């Protein structure tokens, strides 16, 4: 299997950790340190760790941690003006690498906030 096939399989089955872990083994066999990111449990990655991983491996690569996000999941915004605010995922768009969030801070309805998948979110609790 080639790298592109692994990435396609992860995007096809984003909630299945098995493909991600097999890909991590494949990378490790080739001496590629990116395997470290794929072995992380997304729920255990703090905002500080997420930022450090983005600096070390690049945000696009770290996005693989969050491909399993689903509508209804509660996450924490980890960058930008809403940093530190909890939000509920409204919609996930893996093709664009973005999620729409409903911020959990306002009493009045507002338009969902669109943020980059690889820069701003981590799991807090699983929805639905």
Image (spheres, helix red, strand yellow):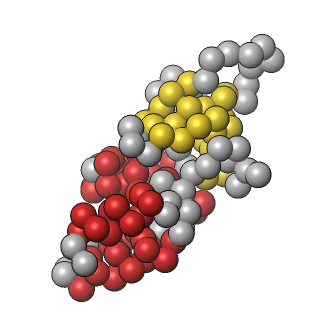
Is residue 120 visible in the rendered image? The answer is: no
Image quadrant for the N terminus? bottom left
Residue positioned 23% across, 68% down in the render: 3
Q: Quadrant of residue 72?
A: top right
Residue that extends furthest to the right in the rendered view of this protein: 107
Q: Is residue 12 above or below residue 18?
A: above
Q: Position of residue 47 (x, y in %)?
A: 51, 48
Q: How many marks?
A: 0
Residue at horizontal 70%, vertical 55%? 126
52 lies above or below 90: below
Q: Residue furthest left?
A: 30
Give the residue drawn at x 39%, y 80%: 22
Of residues 74 and 94, the one nearer the viewer is: 94
Where residue 15 sits, quadrant-wise, is bottom right
- Residue nearest the observer in this picture, 48 or 44: 44
Image vertical order of residue 21 relative to residue 118, above or below: below
**Residue at image x 49%, y 53%?**
66
Judged left or right of residue 126, residue 79 is: left
- Please provide percent x and percent y for residue 128: 76, 52
Estimate the x, y position of residue 119 in percent, counting from the top left: 42, 41
Q: Is residue 17 visible?
A: yes
Locate residue 51, reporting x and y percent: 40, 47
């Amino acid at each position: 299997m080639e790298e592109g096939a692994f990435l396609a399989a992860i995007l096809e089955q984003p909630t299945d950790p098995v493909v991600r872990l097999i890909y991590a083994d494949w990378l490790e066999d080739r001496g590629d340190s990116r395997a470290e990111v794929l072995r992380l449990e997304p729920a255990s990655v703090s905002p500080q760790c997420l930022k450090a991983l983005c600096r070390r491996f690049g945000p696009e690569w770290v996005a693989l941690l969050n491909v399993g996000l689903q509508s209804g999941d509660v996450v924490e915004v980890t960058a930008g003006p809403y940093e530190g605010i909890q939000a509920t995922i409204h919609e996930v768009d893996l093709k664009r690498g973005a999620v729409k969030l409903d911020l959990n801070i306002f009493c009045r309805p507002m338009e969902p906030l669109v943020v980059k998948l690889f820069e701003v979110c981590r799991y807090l609790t699983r929805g639905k």
